[in-house]
Image: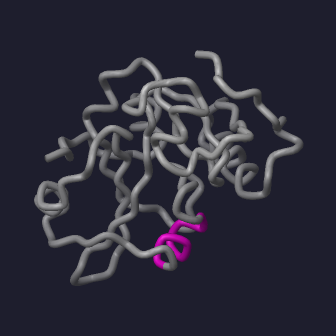
């Protein structure tokens, strides 16, 4: 797939957060190329417009926390879907709640709007939206509100050791 926007970065010119994601991908044995775009990719809609793909092909990383233990969990959802928190709680086996920006940064090392599926400061249990598997390729955030990389849903599952589940209402 061709990017809609002109790519403005090479590996050498990536921002520190995007470089961190590129390095994490390489350490995991993946050769995906992180790119930073001139247009924002902070939201799924913005990312799809900047890339030139469907919103459903955006693999958005959302952090939740288990209410009782305050342990973080990662959900990678199709950009077209909202996460049904009751379904997620059932998969996790405990009540969950959305994490705030400080919690997200503390447990991933990244700000909301650029959280990648890998490269976090700690390993997060991960659930992957089954709807992402409807697409040959998807796009994930790469550490910044302008950084992305292309991959397959199967690669996403392997790199995160995530569990595929139904998450939409």
Residue 97: percent from left, percent from top? 26, 72
Quarter of image, res 58: top left
Q: How many marks?
A: 0
For the N terminus, the quadrant is: top right
Colour pattern: one colour
- Magenta segment: 103-110
- Taking depth in this image into account, of 152 and 40 the one nearest to the observer is 40
Name the outermost residue toward the right.
12
Residue 85: percent from left, percent from top? 19, 60
Side (left or right) of 153 relative to 14: left
Quarter of image, res 124: bottom left
State whether the magenta stretch is mostly helix, strand or loop: helix
Residue at 47% in and 29% down: 138
Instruction: Note whether 68 is above or below 163 in the view shown.
Output: below
Instruction: Note whether 92 is above or below 164 in the view shown.
Output: below
Residue at 65% in and 54% down: 144
Q: Is residue 104 magenta?
A: yes
Q: Is residue 100 magenta?
A: no
Residue 80: percent from left, percent from top? 33, 38
Residue 121: percent from left, percent from top? 57, 67
Side (left or right) of 65 relative to 103: left
Residue at 81% in and 46% down: 14
Side (left or right) of 105 relative to 57: right
Residue at 39% in and 63% down: 63
């Amino acid at each position: 797939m061709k990017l809609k926007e002109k790519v403005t970065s090479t590996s050498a010119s990536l921002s520190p957060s995007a470089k961190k994601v590129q390095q994490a991908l390489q350490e995991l044995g993946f050769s995906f190329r992180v790119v930073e775009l001139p247009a924002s990719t902070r939201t799924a809609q913005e990312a799809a417009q900047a890339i030139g793909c469907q919103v459903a092909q955006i693999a958005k990383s959302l952090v939740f926390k288990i209410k009782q233990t305050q342990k973080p969990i990662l959900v990678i959802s199709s950009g077209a879907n909202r996460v049904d928190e009751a379904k997620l709680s059932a998969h996790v086996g405990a009540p969950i709640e959305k994490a705030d920006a400080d919690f997200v940064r503390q447990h991933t090392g990244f700000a909301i709007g650029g959280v990648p599926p890998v490269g976090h400061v700690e390993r997060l249990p991960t659930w992957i939206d089954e709807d992402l598997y409807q697409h040959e390729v998807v796009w994930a955030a790469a550490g910044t509100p302008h950084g992305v990389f292309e991959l397959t849903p199967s690669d996403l599952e392997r790199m995160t050791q995530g569990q595929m589940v139904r998450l939409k209402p």
